[in-house]
Image (tube, helix red, strand yellow):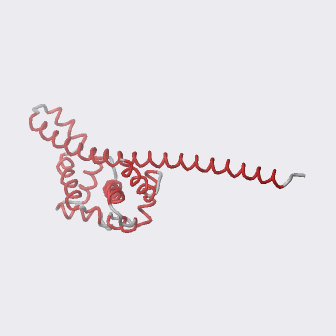
Amino acid sequence: MVTLPVLTIALTIVTIVLLVLVVRSRNVLDKKKHLLTILIDRWIASRQQATEATVAEIDETEEAKEAEESEEAKEAEEAAISAKSRELFPKIVKLMEEQQLYTDEDLNRDMIAEKLGTNYKYVVKAIKDCTGETLTAFINGYRMRHATRLLRDTDDSIAIIAEISGFSHRTLTRLFQAQFGITPSEYRKKSMDSMLKT
């Protein structure tokens, strides 16, 4: 028969082992969340750079087009991205960045087309030609970058951040977790922890 002191010692040892395992698991999770936070910040930067590069490439293409006399080069460029798309995409980007249309939860192709004085089909085609994305993915990219900046730089609640970024709270949480593998609140916590460490 096991005596009370032996049972107490055994329970103490089991408790200590469990605590060590819990602490190690938590440390591993914290490291993973920290890495995800870094990856999210890098994604935001790369997304912004990609948009800027596309606009710059379109500008360079236009300049090269004017300088090039070769009919074959002109035809190859026009096959890749239509002239209308090359003209319209920088305007769409400027509109999104300057007027922050993406913060309107009801934003759609017709609203963008109306602001630009064109047909919605051209808007959708320009975005698809220049980014390879659908209109929804393009708009959500802006919304996600905006929400991520607010999560990192403000103390506003996640519900408020979702609303002012053009999302519902549930949609922001779902898309954020699907894209980055952590919730907005986990990202905020890790982002704050990173700022405190530096």
- Residue closest to the eye, 148 or 106: 148
- Residue closest to the eye, 52 or 43: 43
Which residue corresponds to the image point at 67% horizontal and 49% vertical from the top-left? 16
Q: Is residue 10 left or right of residue 139?
A: right
Q: Is residue 170 above or below residue 23?
A: below
Q: Position of residue 158 (x, y in %)?
A: 40, 65
Which residue corresponds to the image point at 20% horizontal and 41% vertical from the top-left? 57
In which quarter of the view is residue 62 placed?
top left
Q: Position of residue 140 (x, y in %)?
A: 35, 57
Which residue corresponds to the image point at 24% horizontal and 56% vertical from the top-left? 123
Q: Is residue 166 left or right of residue 61?
A: right
- Residue closest to the eye, 35 or 145: 35
Q: Position of residue 135 (x, y in %)?
A: 32, 56
Q: Position of residue 59 (x, y in %)?
A: 16, 43
Which residue corresponds to the image point at 44% horizontal and 48% vertical from the top-left? 34
In which quarter of the view is residue 102 placed?
bottom left
Q: Is residue 64 left or right of residue 177?
A: left
Q: Is residue 152 left or right of residue 125?
A: right
- Residue closest to the eye, 166 or 188: 188
